[in-house]
Amino acid sequence: MNYLHHLLGTSAARGREKGGSAMSCRLLVGWTALGLSAWLAAPALAGEGPPPAGAAGARREELIQAEPPPFTPGIFPCTQCHSGPGDKTRRELTFHDDIKFEHDAEHRWCLDCHSNENRDVLHLSNGDPVPFTESYRLCGQCHGDKFRDWRVGVHGKRTGMWDGPKVYYLCVNCHNPHSPRFKPLKPEPRPLRPEEMRR
Amino acid sequence: MSRPRTSLPVLGEGGAPADPSRRGFLRNACAGAALASLSACGLEDFFHKSFRELSKEDVARVLARLEKRYSAQYGKQVAVAGTPPREGVEFGYGLDLSRCIGCRRCVYACVKENNQSRAHPQIHWIRVLEMEKAHGVDLAHSEIYYEADQVPRPGHFYMPVQCQQCRNPPCVKVCPTQATWKEKDGIVVIDYDWCIGCRCCMSACPYGARHFNWATPTLPAEEMNPATHYLGNRPRPKGVVEKCTFCIQRTRNGRYPACVEICPVGARKFGNLLDPQSEIRQVMETKRVFIFKEDLATQPHFYYFYAT
Amino acid sequence: MSGIVDFLAGCGRLVRRGNRAYYGWLGLLAVAILIGLGAYVHQARTGLIATNMRDQVSWAFYVGNFTFLVGVAAAAVMLVIPAYVYNWGPIKEVVILGELLAISAITMCLLFILVDMGRPDRFLHIVPFIGSPNWPRSMLTWDALVLNAYLVLNLAVVIHILYTGYHGHHYNKALIVPLVLLSVPAAVSIHTVTAFLYNGMASRPYWNASILAPRFLASAFCSGPAVMIILFQVLRKWANIDIKDEAIHKVAELMAYAMFVNLFLLGAEIFKEYYSATEHLLYTQYLWSGIGEHKALVPYAWTGLACNLLAFFLFLVPKTRRTFVGLNLGSILIWAGCYIEKGMGLVIPGMTPDTLGEIYEYRPTGTEWAIAAGVFGVGFLVFTVLVKVAVPIMSGTFHARAEPETSLPAPAAVP
């Protein structure tokens, strides 16, 4: 809900910044933006989640998103700071230096995923914007096999009912998109050896 | 000849007793009378009938009696269900060996969910084997007691083992009292009140999946999970065998088992093999699946696979 | 009815009568039984955690003893075979002693099963009609069936012979001979079924070998008669029974053949494991050379083999077989060798490493030793009492009073 509000507020603000245009034009932009974002955000908001597997007559069971994208608190919306398109030159960033970038750093950098025009969305390789709540579509471009498995529940964690509503997780809920390799965990204690079990 | 093996009588369904023969009637009548008279003097436990032969009224009585006993014992309201298997359901379990990191969270989630003895003996239904990638599945060089600051350790992979819920279970074959049997949905269950503790089944199980209550289980009341099933996670007495039941108390109500839900890497998949849209069917149809100790023809419902 | 009461009273008198050595022996048995009882109470209260059995090695000392004693029970009656096949008088006389030994051995078997069960209070669950035995699929139900049938069979024969002997009548041949002949396949069956119990477990490659049942029978043929040989000499001396040397020597000769077969079958197993050298070799390896630093069984394995080999040569060479020193030494050695083979050499390696490759080295606890001592005490007591009653009947010194003397002599001989 916050997201939609911010999107609306942003586009309206942008209209104000640029100034000039008639009220109707601003309203048109605003409503289009609203409609577009609603269309984009609706699946996540309505809880329908990732698109179902391609099989004909597939059962659309209820898939509930577990968590929103794990933003650092206060960082979103990005357009708080990024008011418009920025420098496209590949470089080391100063503000976002807390991000350790280990995702094909040799060939990629931020703007390969983050939209230069609108920092509140990501973009696919053909330029189509993708909201953060559907970041899986972006991940799936390169990691198609994982994406296909995730869509049907074979990759990644799901909780809930095998026979009913399930809670699914976005890729980014488990894999930090900037440093996606799954981090090792501390294991739980080893079992007792039989000789350690005496009365 | 051994009695016909039937599923649990369904509460609320009109069902005949399991053995409709005259001998069965006499036995039921005598046992019913005996039960009624003996319950008063507490000898009911000694003379009770096998669970599968009870009428639905007797089942309800048994469950109510157990609920009362456990509630008093653990100081909280304990429910003991007798949920029967669902029609058209055959459970399948998938374990992604390319994902398991050996964190053992499944082991302890299972312990909490299923009310296992915490100490003397410590019972874990899931045992995680650490092996070397270079040697593959080599049980002789596997390690259950691995300790590390972080898992996965480089060069190692992890293989959790639990009851495989075999279609051709050797444990059911050897049990002398039919205290363990295979249900219609594929789960191999144990009646803890019928088991005589001979441990034939433990010798017969190729997967080390069955565990024995060598002493009265240590189950602290505050850690006890009160949502139980008669054939699943209700507190066990001393001297009987227990094992993974695919969290029968959860799965027969449509929920995932505890191990599936806790796994942080999503290595565990569970569902209805008869449903083409289920995750486990997707696994079977698209992944490289193998069966542990396949040469023993146990035909488990448990499948190991490699997603990548 | 009064006849039976008199008989039992007479038996009671016989059992109470004895010299110092006899009372010393009874005292020893009583101590063993009391120790066993105390230990069992502790085990029943604490649970089987009082043993050293755990999930990894879930059958051990009790089941090992059970397996060995089934062999003794079977073999005790094996003597019947040559008696009837060769129609050999000298052995016919002593067959009843074999049956008494069988009864005592089966009693111990049943007790070892009882102490090994987690819930002995639920033994009724295996009884047909009251419980729900998994017959015919479960080998343990077959074992329960044949063991109890064998016990009943032997009891029936012994009671009939002794009771009729007590009354000075000859036993009913039409009844006894078929039963005695039946006891031969019954004896084979108890040990074969016990072997099948292990044999049928595909999960334990060490046991899942077709050679197991023949090996069981071969070692039973060795160890059972060994007990008999020693017993015959003891009874000859102390109970005034006439047992001819011929009988003893014939039994020893048959044992020599059995020992050869026993060693041959062992050799066949060793060849298969070491030559094929699959992963299944691990279990055999654990027994004979250990795995890594796990070598607990190795001394026992080699000691057992040494006993068997030495006994074989003592019995093979007629010179040593015919001296009583050689005979008795050989008997003790083969008994020890078969005990090790069936106990430590069968049950423990079958479970070590376990099904997931883990090695847990098992050693019995004090509780297990105590309970085993108690069970053996009970078995020896049963045998002592039976012999104390049977011998006077057989020799005619214990008979019913107030029976007019008939022309039939009190039979000293039994089938």
Image (tube, helix red, strand yellow):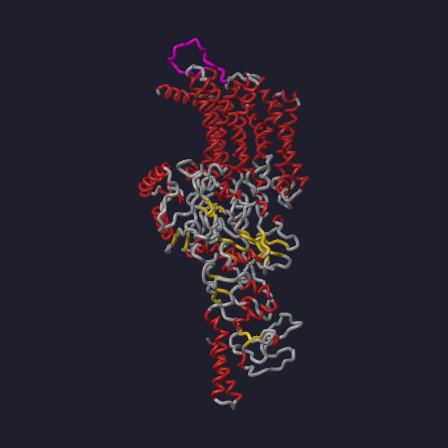
Q: Where is residue C101 in the image (x, y as percent from the top left)?
A: 50, 26
Q: Which residue lies furthest to the bottom in this view?
A: A20
Total marks placed: 0
Image position, residue C74 (x, y; %):
53, 28
**Residue C202 seen by the camera:** yes
Task: Give the answer, above or below, for where A136 lies relative to B183.
Answer: below
Chief secondary structure of the magenta portion: loop
- The residue segment tinted magenta is C396-415
| Position of residue C321 measured from the top left corner of the image (x, y, whole percent) | 63, 22
Residue C124 occupies quadrant = top left
Residue C404 painted magenta:
yes
Residue under the point 66% across and 26% down: C313
Q: Is A172 placed above or below C59 here?
A: below
Extreme residue toward the right, this view: C275
Q: Which of A26 and C32 is in front in this view?
A: A26
Q: Is residue B52 left or right of residue A173?
A: left
Tell me if residue B107 is in the magenta stretch.
no
Which quarter of the figure has residue A123? bottom right
Residue furthest out toward the front:
A56
Q: In this view, does B224 lie above or below A18?
A: above
Q: Can residue B146 be seen in this view?
A: no
x and y percent of residue A167 in the render? 48, 64
